[in-house]
Amino acid sequence: DVKVTQSSRYLVKRTGEKVFLECVQDMDHENMFWYRQDPGLGLRLIYFSYDVKMKEKGDIPEGYSVSREKKERFSLILESASTNQTSMYLCASSLGVRYTEAFFGQGTRLTVV
Amino acid sequence: DAKTTQPPSMDCAEGRAANLPCNHSTISGNEYVYWYRQIHSQGPQYIIHGLKNNETNEMASLIITEDRKSSTLILPHATLRDTAVYYCIAPNTGNQFYFGTGTSLTVIP
C-alpha cells in the first residue's frame, strides 16, 4: 500500500516563527502536493511538484514556499507564520505525468498563536 | 481543469442507495472524472474514476452521462461509515488537480 506520511499530526507555533511541514511518500511517485483545508473553503492547492527540485504554484502560494530535494520528500515552509495560516495541511502524491489517483497523508493541524 | 458543481449536503437512510450527483459541463473529451471521499479528520481517499463508460468497484459505482456533462456516484447500500464529504473532480491532463467543497453525505440510522 502507498503510504504518505506527514511528520506531525498536531503542531502549535508562535506568530513569526519559521515552520517546516514534512511529507514523505514510499511509492516512488513523481508528483507531490500540498493543500490546506479550511471550513467552508474545501481543499485549496498551495504548491505542487512533478519532479525533484521542480515546483509549481497552486491557488494560494502566498506566504508559503516548498522544497523537494529528494523524490520521496516534499516540505512546506511557512517563512513567518501568521494566525491566518492556522489550518489543516494535507500532503498528497501521485504517479506519472498524466493525472492518476492521489494518495493523501493524514494531515497536520497547525495552530499559530 | 473542468469546473465541477456538487450539492453541498445530502442525507441517506442506512441500507439505501446513496446517489451523489456532480455536474461537469465544461469537461473536455479526454478528461477523466475522479471521486474521492474524506471521513472526518482523515485525508481524502480515492474511490473511483471513469472517462465515459460506467465503472464499478468494491466501493461504489460511477455513472457518467452520454454527453459526459454530469456523473453520479452510487453507494449501493449506505452504511454509517459512509458518512463523509465526497469530492468530484475533473483534472486536466497535466499534473494539477483541484478540489472544491464537495458534498457532505450524512447516513441516517
Image: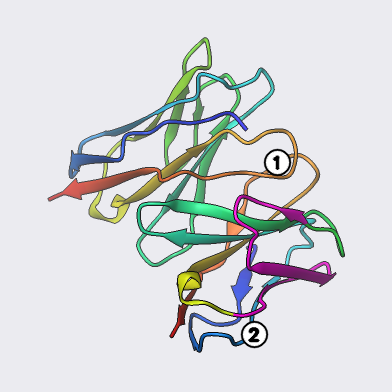
* Residue A6 among magenta residues: no
Position of residue B79 measured from the top left corner of the image (x, y, whole percent): 25, 49
Q: Say whether residue A38 is left or right of residue B30.
A: left
Up the image or down, B23 lies above or below A54; here it is above
Residue occupying the point 71% across, 56% down: A48
Q: Is residue B41 shown left or right of residue A27?
A: left
Element at label 1: loop
On residue A99, which mark appears? 1
The picture quadrant where one finds residue B8 is top left
**Quadrant the N terminus of chain A occupies:** bottom right
Q: Chain of mark 1?
A: A
The three-letter amino acid code for the residue at tag 1 is Tyr
Residue B18 falls left or right of residue B25: left
Q: Which residue is drawn at the image coordinates 60% and 24% (left, top)?
A: B51
The residue at 64%/20% (across/down) is: B28
Distance Cα–Cα, label 2 vs label 1: 32 Å
Task: Specify few, some or many for label 1: CA neighbours under 10 Å numbering under 14, 14-19, or 20 or more.
Answer: many
* Depicted B77 relative to depicted A53: above or below: above
Type of amino acid at the residue the image marks with label 2: Lys
Question: Label 2's element?
Answer: loop
Image quadrant in which the C terminus of chain A is located: bottom left
**Where in the figure is residue A19, as x and y percent of width and height?**
62, 83
Instruction: Name the dominant secondary structure of the magenta segment.
Output: strand
Residues marked 2 and 1, same chain? yes
The verdict on residue A60 being magenta is yes
Bin the neighbour count of mark 2 within 10 Å (Cα to Cα): few under 14, some 14-19, many 20 and up: few
**Which label's residue is closer to the chain start, 2 or 1?**
2
**Left or right of A69 in this view: A77:** left
Q: What label sits on residue A67 in the rendered view?
A: none
Q: Which residues are magenta?
A: A56-80
Closer to us: B61 or A25 = A25
Query: Which mark identifies residue A18?
Result: 2
